[in-house]
Image (cartoon, grey):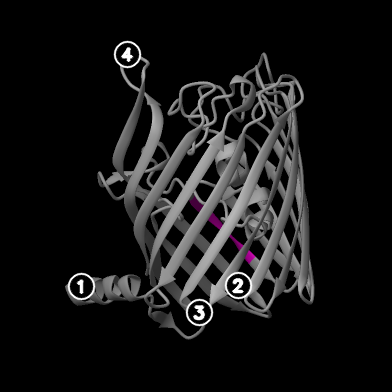
Amino acid sequence: MKRSLAIAGTLLATGATAHAQSSVTLYGVADAGIEYLNHVPNAARQSSSLVRMTSGNIAGSRWGLRGVEDLGGGLKGVFLLEGGMVLDTGMAAQGGRLFGRRAYIGLDTPYGQITMGRHHNLTFDLIIGFDPMYFAPKYSSYSHDTWLAGRTDNAVKYTGKFGALTASALYSFGVDSTIANGSEVPGNSRVGREMSAGFSYGMGKFRVAGVFDQLNGTSAATAGRTERRYVVSAAADFGPVSAYFGYRRLVSQILTSMTRTDLFWAGGTYNFKQALALTGAVYKTNDRTSAKDPMSLVMSADYRFSKRTDAYLTASYTLNKGGSALGANGYDGSVIAGANQFGAVVGLRHNF
């Protein structure tokens, strides 16, 4: 018995094949660095600087288990369990959830994959490759709109790949189970509901994608209100150079401020002989309900020591027009309203 358990543990730890055509793989990302920010409010609400250790800077630190079983006839059973971690403290991310990033089970068929559980939303799945910073937790379009890389509970997702076309759809019975009476409420199926559909298409050197996403309020009082996002993006690859463009329209009946905004981004990456990559990007939010129109300018250098380990230096300068309060890391209270903020982070990332 002990020997069987030891063998099972070894299979999980190494991602070895349990039997022909079936496997369970352990994987993850460890990302940590040192960040500097200016114009951070101190206890007296005065402008100060901050130096701190941070986790998950250009990629969220995580660990996960991915499993697949060949059921024959082109049918496969799949599951995935993925939890976020905070390297500087050892705590679990996503509010302490064990598998806060993703947790699902499903079937993979010749006509597409259907899964049930906690998922990334479709803007993450389909648009991440069109952001110059790939929705990095720091200094990307994620700072302007965190739902671009959101996650949803109680969801059924379909993804089908047909040549160069990928088509996806998602329905959630309640996006956030941690909110009391905020999802799967008897007699009111609209509470916390999410509906989304999108596509991506590749044409040689060019790629395009689009997503529609609609959320309902997470209470009985707001269930009839919606928050809609319309996202379109394009990218082109020319040898070592890649260019990215994106647009997101937000129309919200749920938010109390910035209820109608446009987010634009553009940028490019140049790869030097497979070791060094330089990226530049600009992200601009236009608030149609006020003069608060913040803009972020981002530069990043990434040096790859190997296929698994790299070092990075990323800097951001955020201009807060009209009294907006967007920090380098988003609307997190880390900048004095109306003040511009400079942020920089240097760190290491290892994929396993």
| Residue type highlighted by circle 2 | Lys
Q: Relative to residue 85, is residue 69 drawn left or right?
A: right
Mark 4 → mark 3, Cα distance in angstroms:
48 Å
Q: Which residue is mark 3?
A: 274
As rendered, which of 173 and 130 lies closer to the eye? 130
Mark 1 → mark 2, Cα distance in angstroms:
29 Å
| Residue type highlighted by circle 3 | Gln
**Labelled pair 4, 2 in contact (Cβ < 8 Å):** no
Q: Which residue is mark 2?
A: 76
Residue span colored magenta: 102-107
Q: Which residue is mark 4?
A: 44
Residue 352 position by quadrant: bottom left
Which secondary structure lies at badge 3?
loop
Q: Relative to residue 202, is residue 347 drawn left or right?
A: left
Q: Which residue is mark 1?
A: 1
Q: Is residue 61 magenta?
A: no
As rendered, which of 77 and 264 lies closer to the eye? 264
Which secondary structure lies at badge 1?
loop
Q: Position of residue 304 (x, y in %)?
A: 42, 73
Using a 10 Å C-alpha cutoff, classify the residue at mark 2 as few (fewer than 14 neighbours), some (14 to 19) or many (20 or more).
Answer: some
Q: Quadrant of the N terminus?
A: bottom left
Mark 3 → mark 2, Cα distance in angstroms:
35 Å
Vertical position of residue 345 compared to residue 288: above or below: below
Q: Position of residue 332 (x, y in %)?
A: 47, 29
Q: Main secondary structure of the magenta part?
A: strand
Is residue 150 visible in the rendered image? The answer is no
**Labelled pair 3, 1 in contact (Cβ < 8 Å):** no
Q: Disc 3 vs disc 1: which is toward the camera?
A: 3
Q: Residue visible at 38% across and 80% down?
A: 16
